[in-house]
Image (spheres, rainbow, N blue to C red):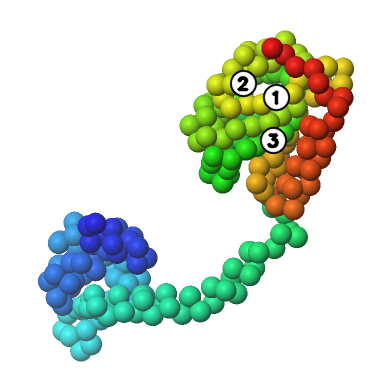
Amino acid sequence: MEAVDGLNYLGLNEKQAKIYMALLQFGQNTAYAIAETTNLKRPTVYVILEDLRIKGLVRKIPHAKKQLFSAKAPDELLAESQERLNRAKTILPQLLALTKSEQRPKTYLFEGIKGIEEALEMNLDKVIQKELVGFYAQASDIPRGLLSVFEKYNQKMKRLGISSRGIVPNHPSLAVYRERDKEFGRNMKVIPFEMFSSNNMVEVGESTIKIISFHDLHAVIIENQGIAQTFKQIFEMVWKSGKIEERIN
């Protein structure tokens, strides 16, 4: 790792890091000399030196005939950073407690084909080698761009080892998907179109419910484990229903 990159982790941007390193290398120096060394404009150097002074990384040399600056020693900088980290760790339990609020679901809204693509890929990393369940819509008259999005989504699920079970309508627009169910680890129960003809899909993961409208090009995501489990229970009741028997071979 280069020194500039390391200083980035300590909260310094590239220009701040260059000036700090120049002061370490050449010791006490003027803003003019620093500008020459770093190839930065003098007004920029003055602004950054003041920022670094406020951060406590640079100090002005008092009583000097010329305005001189010096850098804080690196070991002091790291020690102070470690001290701030240790203090932050003491309040970590309180911060984590604020995030453990299952009673407050998080909701996200996405629009357009690009938005649906983002919605589909959201939280996939949480279900690698796991199963999704859902109610899947017919695919007639949907934008061609959306078909490409779903193909990309299916391929990514395949790479991640994500399987799925679903309830789908018996519709010609879905025949091509049924032909590839085994390839993509899908187990689908196909029911008569008059029983289920939705243009919307609902897909449920470990703690996420995705509701996607094909024709309106809207997607809503609800993040909450309790709600997701409720949707899964509803799905399982429908899945086990004796009325759902028709399949496409």
Reading the image, the residue beneath label 2 is 181
Residue at the limit of the structure toward the left, as seen here: 26
Of the 4 image quadrants, the one containing the N terminus is: bottom left
Instruction: Evaluate if marks 1 and 2 touch, with contact meaning CB atoms under 8 Å apart.
Output: yes
Q: Position of residue 214 (x, y in %)?
A: 71, 25
Of the 4 image quadrants, the one containing the C terminus is: top right
Label 1 CA crowd tier, 10 Å (few <14, some 14–19, many 20+)? many
Reading the image, the residue beneath label 3 is 133
Horizontally, residue 240 falls left or right of residue 209, namely right
Reading the image, the residue beneath label 1 is 188
Residue drawn at x 75%, y 27% is 167
Q: Amino acid at mark 2?
A: Asp
Instruction: In this rendered view, identify the residue nearer to me: 41 or 99.
Output: 99
Q: In the rendered image of this protein, does residue 142 appear above or below residue 128?
A: above
Horizontally, residue 2 falls left or right of residue 133, namely left
Disc on the earlier residue, 2 or 3: 3
Asked whether the viewer can see residue 144, the reply is no
Disc 3 is placed on an element classified as strand
Disc 2 is placed on an element classified as loop
Residue drawn at x 70%, y 52% is 225
